[in-house]
């Protein structure tokens, strides 16, 4: 058998961010007219104050397209130059055709852009980013578009106050390109078998439900160890990390996790307050919004860490982009 000529490994980096959220904002006070709850009950237990809810014309694909378009513009990359599109979601509209293919077509990409849909729920973006990083490193693509997009409002029981107060809709995206040095650290991923059914989207029609206490207990007792493993895999210490970007599940989970890890990050993503839990979209959505506001530091190590349905978790340390002149 002839020898396969594999190119030398190269690095990858994030070139830009983009995001999109539906125009409709649902406040806690409005929710209190729909289900037995109130602003104090919600904010005390979750930290959430508002969330964006999809309208009749908002789909997972349309939100992913807009987030992807914004990310390409931020990165200064033409759609025709993208060789890989990955869309992470637990609310894909169809099993086929895939959301990623629809996104590629809507953005005017060429037939060489490989489309991939994945579903590891709330850790989906980190899984997708890990796959894109590896594809760029080995030469399967020079540029990749990675998107997390969710329409959770369509799979929640709006009479169940334990879940409907949590969810929001939206999409976040990042463009990954070739770098002389590795600016995206190795993905550290895994699962928790005994919590496999702790977060579920099941039934017909499908509804989102979860075991909140089990998730909270895992997050405040075990998540920090997994996050430290992500940092160690990248060759950093916690004190080196300038940004913490965790899955935006609940502020009561994010704050204890930040405290448990210690260190002195200059920025902690807390977009859950404005956007609620957007599952696979939450980390890129929070990062992109902070980037657009000018709050996210440039060229610094950021810890990304997602966890949830499955029960899968994943993360990596990335260098934040630097703004183009």
Image (cartoon, rainbow, N blue to C red):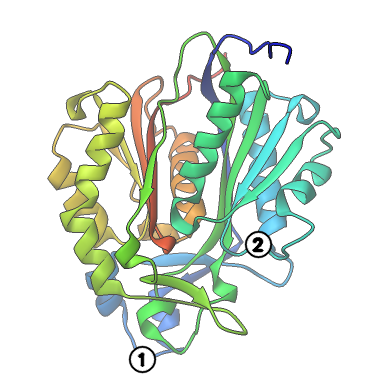
Q: Closer to the camera, 125 or 166? A: 125
Residue 252 placement (x, y as % from top left): 23, 61
Residue to which mark 1 is pinned:
36
Q: Is residue 204 left or right of residue 80?
A: left
Residue 185 placement (x, y as % from top left): 40, 26
> Element type at marker 2?
loop
State the separation of the CA atoms marked 1 and 2: 30 Å
| Residue 178 quadrant | top right
| Residue 44 quadrant | bottom left
Residue to which mark 2 is pinned:
92
**Mark 1 or 2, closer to the camera:** 2
Residue 170 placement (x, y as % from top left): 56, 57
Q: Closer to the camera, 229 or 42? A: 229
Asked whether residue 16 appears in the rendered view, the answer is no
Q: Is the residue marked by circle 1 packed among few (<14), some (14-19), or many (20+) residues within 10 Å?
A: few
Q: Is residue 308 left or right of residue 137?
A: left
Which numbered dot is residue 50?
none
Q: Is residue 282 left or right of residue 203?
A: left
Residue 31 placement (x, y as % from top left): 43, 81
Q: Is the residue marked by circle 2 packed among few (<14), some (14-19), or many (20+) residues within 10 Å?
A: many
Q: Is residue 268 above or below residue 213?
A: above
Quadrant in which the N terminus appears:
top right
Look at 41% across and 28% down and name the residue there: 186
> Element type at marker 1?
loop
Look at 43% across and 63% down and name the residue there: 309
């Amino acid at each position: 058998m002839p020898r396969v000529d594999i190119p030398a490994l190269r690095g990858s980096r994030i070139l830009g961010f983009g995001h999109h959220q539906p125009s409709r904002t649902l406040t806690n006070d409005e929710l209190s007219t729909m289900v037995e709850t109130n602003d104090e009950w919600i904010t005390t237990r979750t930290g959430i104050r508002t969330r964006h809810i999809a309208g009749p014309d908002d789909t997972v694909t349309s939100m992913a397209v807009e987030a992807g378009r914004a990310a390409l513009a931020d990165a200064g990359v033409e759609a025709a130059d993208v060789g890989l599109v990955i869309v992470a979601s637990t609310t894909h509209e169809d099993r086929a055709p895939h959301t990623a293919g629809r996104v590629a077509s809507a953005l005017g990409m060429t037939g060489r852009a490989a489309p991939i849909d994945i579903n590891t729920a709330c850790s989906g973006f980190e899984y997708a980013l890990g796959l894109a990083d590896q594809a760029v490193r080995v030469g399967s693509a020079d540029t990749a578009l990675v998107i997390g997009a969710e329409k959770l409002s369509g799979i929640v029981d709006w009479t169940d106050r334990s879940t409907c107060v949590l969810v929001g809709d939206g999409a976040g995206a990042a463009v990954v390109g070739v770098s002389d040095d590795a600016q995206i650290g190795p993905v550290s991923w895994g699962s928790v078998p005994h919590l496999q059914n702790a977060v579920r989207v099941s039934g017909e029609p499908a509804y989102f439900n979860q075991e909140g206490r089990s998730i909270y207990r895992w997050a405040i007792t075990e998540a920090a160890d997994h996050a430290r493993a992500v940092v160690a895999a990248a060759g950093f210490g916690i004190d080196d990390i300038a940004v913490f970007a965790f899955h935006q599940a609940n502020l009561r989970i994010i704050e204890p996790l930040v405290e448990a890890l210690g260190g002195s990050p200059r920025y902690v993503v807390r977009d859950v307050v404005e956007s609620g839990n957007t599952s696979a979209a939450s980390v890129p959505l929070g990062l992109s919004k902070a980037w657009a506001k000018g709050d996210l530091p440039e060229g610094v190590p950021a810890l990304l860490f997602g966890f949830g349905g499955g029960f899968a978790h994943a993360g990596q340390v990335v260098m934040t982009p630097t703004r183009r002149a």
